[in-house]
């Protein structure tokens, strides 16, 4: 079984997150998504950072409230 690469390109990270590549570019520009800058125009994404970023943004579900009898 082949191990998945730890660092991902824009294309790979966008697909992994289910985003358009342009949306990911905007998030990087605004520094709203974790990334590794290896050069002025060379950006990569760590899978573990993206997983943590997603978990940090998870919204817990609300408990189901039952209606009382009238």
Image (cartoon, rainbow, N blue to C red):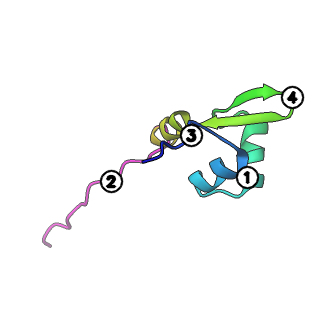
Q: Is residue 37 left or right of residue 65?
A: right
Q: Are marks 3 and 4 in contact (CB under 8 Å)?
A: no
**x, y percent for residue 34:** 63, 33
At a point 79% along the width and 37% down the height, the residue shown is 29
- Earlier residue among tags 2 and 4: 4
Q: What residue sits right under mark 2 in the picture?
A: 62
Please name which of the two marks, 1 or 4, marks the residue nearer to the observer: 4
Q: Is residue 13 left or right of residue 29?
A: left
Please name which of the two marks, 2 or 3, marks the residue nearer to the observer: 3
Q: What stretch is highlighted in magenta?
A: 56-70
Q: Residues within 10 Å of mark 4 (few under 14, many from 20)?
A: few
| CA distance for labels 2 and 4 | 43 Å
At a point 37% along the width and 48% down the height, the residue shown is 60
| CA distance for labels 1 and 4 | 19 Å
Q: What residue sits right under mark 3 in the picture?
A: 5
Main secondary structure along the magenta-highlighted residues:
loop
Using the image, tell me which numbered label, if any, was put on residue 40: 4
Q: Residues within 10 Å of mark 3 (few under 14, many from 20)?
A: few
| CA distance for labels 3 and 4 | 22 Å
């Amino acid at each position: 079984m082949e191990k998945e690469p730890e660092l991902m390109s824009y294309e790979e990270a966008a697909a992994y997150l289910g985003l358009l590549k342009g949306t990911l570019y905007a998030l990087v520009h605004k520094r709203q998504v974790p990334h590794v800058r290896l050069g002025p125009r060379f950006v990569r994404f760590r899978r573990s950072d993206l997983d943590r970023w997603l978990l940090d943004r998870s919204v817990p579900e609300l408990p189901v409230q039952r209606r009382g009898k009238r």
